[in-house]
Image (cartoon, rainbow, N blue to C red):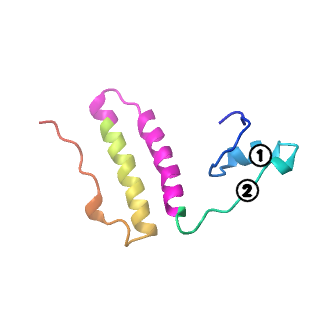
Amino acid sequence: MSDLQPGVHQHLVTRELDGLLRAVSDRDLIDRRSLDPADSHETLARHLAALTRRALRSVRGDNDAVRLARQVEIVNWVAGLLGDLVPEAASPEEIVEAAQSC
């Protein structure tokens, strides 16, 4: 997001967006509200999913097998971190097995 376009927007305020909003001279144009706790998990999960998708898409490797192995490694690292932070939400059984050629 490199430029703010005029209009009504509903966005999660990231550091980048916060910087853009701070540059707006007419503060009356900005209406910042907190996330609704009833559905904040959905909004934050969409944000995390977009970051994850972009990260996995950008993984490079010498070949497809190397690329896939690195993607699985990243996913398992994130799943492990979630399991450490919220044990009831992610278990070791949800770790992705390494892809095997058939």
Which of the marked residues, 2 or 1, is nearer the chain's N terminus? 1
At label 2, counting other C-alpha atoms closer than 10 Å, the crowd grade (few under 14, some 14-19, many 20 or more) is: few
- As drawn, the residue found furthest toward the bottom would be 88
Residue furthest out toward the left: 102
**Relative to 2, is 91 above or below?**
below
Q: Position of residue 101 (x, y in %)?
A: 16, 36
Give residue 96's position: percent from left, percent from top.
27, 52
Q: Quadrant of residue 69?
A: top left
Residue 24, picture quadrant: top right
In which quadrant of the rendered image does the N terminus lie? top right
Residue 4, relative to residue 96: is it above or below? above
State which quarter of the image contains the C terminus: top left
Residue 58 among magenta residues? yes
Q: Identify residue for label 2.
A: 32
The label number, if any, that marks residue 21 in the structure image: 1
Q: Residue at x 48, y 55 (%)?
A: 45
